[in-house]
Image (tube, helix red, strand yellow):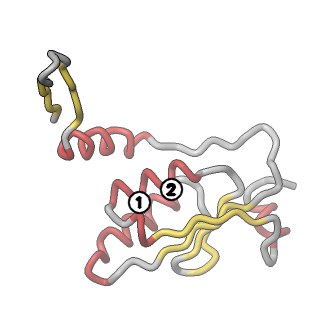
């Protein structure tokens, strides 16, 4: 899971292999949480994805993990959360190998936002 190489100048380089990266990601994936800040910044985080049918298992696992993290569904492949989660979304995309299929956006307003404020206890 790690690779050690000696350079001509005598320097030793230690790096994580792809297998090691995946193992590391799997350990963090299980315990991942997104914490709500003390004060909401007024921004909505919207995450959408268009994952090909050949990666259906990854698509369904992504949906499941996003729900576990507290996201609410806006549409089938469009989720919302009022807290910063950009790093977590990038991590999840990498974990499932579908990062290029995911779009992350921040918005100041969403339709029916009073409903979502209530659901996230922001009122």
Q: Which residue is mark 1?
A: 93
- Residue 104 position within the rendered picture, expressed as x and y whole percent measured from the top left: 58, 64
Asked which secondary structure carries label 1, the reply is helix
Residue 121 falls left or right of residue 6: right
Which residue reaches farthest bottom?
53
Between 99 and 78, which is closer to the camera in this rendering? 99
Q: Quadrant of residue 10?
A: top left
Distance between the Cα atoms at labels 2 and 1?
Answer: 6 Å
- Residue 79 position within the rendered picture, expressed as x and y whole percent measured from the top left: 59, 69
Which residue occupies 55% across, 73% down?
48
Height in image: 36 above or below 86? above
Asked which secondary structure carries label 2, the reply is helix
Height in image: 58 above or below 53? above
Between 100 and 4, which is closer to the camera in this rendering? 4
Which residue occupies 64% across, 76% down?
74
Which residue reaches farthest top?
10
Mark 2 Cα within 10 Å, few/some/many (few <14, many 20+)?
some
Which residue occupies 31% across, 77% down?
56
Which quadrant does the C terminus fall into? bottom right
Q: How many marks?
A: 2
Q: Are marks 2 and 1 in contact (CB under 8 Å)?
A: yes
Residue 29 falls left or right of residue 55: right
Mark 1 Cα within 10 Å, few/some/many (few <14, many 20+)?
many
Which residue occupies 80% across, 78% down?
111
Which quadrant does the N terminus fall into? top left
Which residue reaches farthest front?
9
Q: Which residue is mark 2?
A: 89
Give the label on residue 62, or none: none
């Amino acid at each position: 899971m790690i690779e050690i190489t000696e350079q001509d100048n005598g320097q030793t380089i230690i790096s994580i292999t792809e297998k090691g990266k995946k193992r590391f990601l799997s350990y963090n994936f299980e315990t991942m949480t997104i914490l709500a800040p003390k004060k909401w910044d007024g921004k909505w985080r919207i995450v959408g994805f268009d994952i090909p049918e050949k990666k259906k298992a990854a698509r369904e696992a992504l949906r499941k993990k996003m729900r576990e993290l507290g996201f609410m569904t806006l549409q089938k492949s469009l989720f919302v959360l009022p807290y910063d989660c950009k790093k977590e979304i990038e991590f999840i995309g990498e974990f499932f190998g579908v990062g290029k299929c995911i779009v992350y956006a921040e918005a100041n307003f969403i339709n029916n936002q009073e409903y979502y404020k209530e659901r996230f206890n922001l009122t």
